[in-house]
Amino acid sequence: EVQLVQSGAEVKKPGESLKISCKGSGYSFTSYWIGWVRQMPGKGLEWMGIIYPGDSDTRYSPSFQGQVTISADKSISTAYLQWSSLKASDTAMYYCARHVAVTTGYYFDYWGQGTLVTVSS
Amino acid sequence: EIVLTQSPGTLSLSPGERATLSCRASQSVSSSYLAWYQQKPGQAPRLLIYGASSRATGIPDRFSGSGSGTDFTLTISRLEPEDFAVYYCQQYGSSTGTFGQGTKLEIK
């Protein structure tokens, strides 16, 4: 069974750093892209970026390039999303999802449960 | 970056009715790169349709997707109570992706 298990909720202050995680199991972690999606309170989904754990090839949305860093440690089947200096506007639910990239389609098929990040002074 | 515009913003229908949700792209999208998701309150999104018209595993056949180029449609043939949720289209192209802003399907 494919599973993506995300780290727990975080409460941080503006200016602090943060790294959240997403552990994959039940499939070959290095054979699929993993993506991150932001959902601000009461708002829609935003595509942030994806990483291919096999070779760490990473693609970012222009909206998030330079704002966050996506990484992966294939030895422990875990992807990460990190911030060096959080802002209040980073308050959101963050989902990781497995990204399928084949000729028949490009899409997120399995999703983590989400990690709620709250940034407040 | 391709912008996806979904309409209507909110759709009020009754169980048993047919729902038609639209997703329009600011430039042409390969059909392979267009997907639809359902999200219920407090839950992660769920994949419904990929490749514009292929149902994901376990998705009932009352859900169907169609379209090409810049215009795509998600149709729910006969609404069940569990179908009332928010629906998002999403595209991937030129090494990045975007979501539409969502359509809320509510009970009339």
Image (tube, helix red, strand yellow):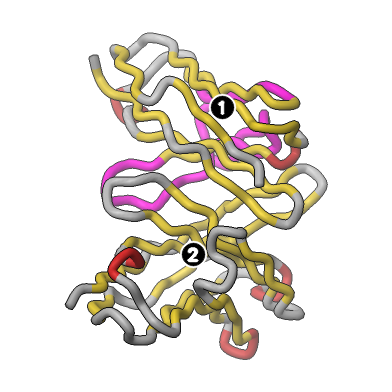
Asked whether B43 or A117 is in front, the reply is: A117
Residue highlighted by disc 1: B23
Subunit ID for the residue under disc 1? B
Q: Is residue A96 above or below residue A28?
A: above
- Residue in the image at 66% along x and 38% along y: B34
Q: Is residue B98 left or right of residue B102?
A: right
Q: Magenta span covers which residues?
A: B39-68
Q: Is residue A9 above or below residue A102?
A: below
Q: Residues within 10 Å of mark 1 (few under 14, many from 20)?
A: many
- Check the picture and name the quadrant holding the C terminus of chain A: bottom left
Q: Residue A21 lies in magenta, yes or no?
A: no
Q: Is residue A101 left or right of residue A112?
A: right
Subunit ID for the residue under disc 2? A
- Residue B104: x %, y % from top left: 35, 29
Q: Is residue A114 above or below residue B49?
A: below
- Residue in the image at 38% along x and 42% along y: B39
Residue A96 circle label: 2
Give SS at disc 1.
Answer: strand
Type of amino acid under label 1: Cys
Separation of marks 2 and 1 at Cα, in angstroms = 24 Å
